[in-house]
Amino acid sequence: MQKRKSSKIDKVYAKHIAELQDFEFSTQVANVFPDMLQRSIPGYSFTLDLIELISRQFAKPNTNVYDLGCSLGATIEQIYKCLPKTCQIIGVENSSAMVKQCKTNIEPVNRQSNIVIRHEDLRDTKIENASVVVMNLTLQFIPVKDRDSVLKKIANGLIEGGVLILCEKVNFDDAYEQSMLNNLYVEFKRAQGYSELEIVQKRAALENVLIPDTISELKKRAKRSGFTKAQLISQCLNFVGLIAVK
């Protein structure tokens, strides 16, 4: 399992912002993104390890492995060694700032030139001959109206027995469970050194951008999109991992 690199400390929301804008994957965010992920996503390192384990089991020779919403390439860096050498790895990212840094990060490990990073909206990406597709904290940023069509396209582009690894922040059907886990998540961020101002401002910035599904809705989406199984495989507070099998 690969250790993550150190990065600059996330201070994006450390000072009061008079006119708070919706969260976006800007150059400012890209510069501190590894630290932001580690301090904002409980179990993030374990999630990368889990993606590696699943990819090792399901990736097939002479197929494509997609990382949709690849950001800085952390997942690709994690899994490339465990894949068959004849696999083509395709990372897709819509943020130009993320793509620029991702290509730099990936260059040292792309000795066989089998890793391609595409700067495009994943809704426009053609999925074909795929044995593994990864969406790590990605579907939650796709407009709700487009989520089923994205999942259907993925299912259609997977080979039989291929898998979608779907990691998401989720809401809960039960009000008490929702409140409890939200409160625990805030405590987690405090324990990571985020101030009350940072927590409040980032939550407000994400409110109209990150729209979580529930676990049951994610499973329903997968089933109606053409996957035969959708299994919950991990949960850390309000972040979960599912594997959907074609």
Image: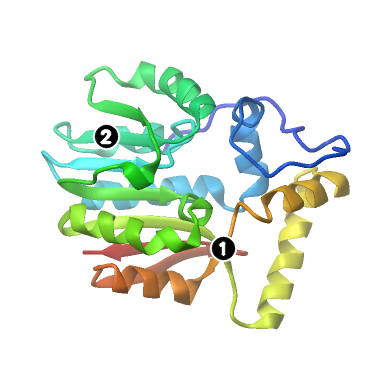
Q: Quadrant of the N terminus?
A: top left
Quadrant of res 11: top right
Indicate the position of residue 207 as horizontal and vertical percent values: 68, 56
| Number of other residues with Cα within 10 Å of mark 1, as a class: few under 14, some 14 to 19, many 20 or more | many
**Which residue is drawn at the image coordinates 43% and 32% (left, top)?**
73
Specify the farthest residue to the left: 62
Q: Position of residue 66 (x, y in %)?
A: 30, 42
Camera-nearest residue between 89 and 220: 220
Residue denoted by label 1: 212
Q: Amino acid at mark 1?
A: Pro
Is residue 97 depicted above or below 43 in this figure? above
Q: Which residue position holds label 2?
A: 89
Q: CA distance from mark 2 to mark 1?
A: 27 Å
Instruction: Tell me which label, 2 or 1, sits earlier in the chain.
Output: 2
Q: Residues within 10 Å of mark 2 (few under 14, many from 20)?
A: many
* Badge 2 amino acid: Ile
- Decide if residue 192 is on the left or right side of residue 46: right
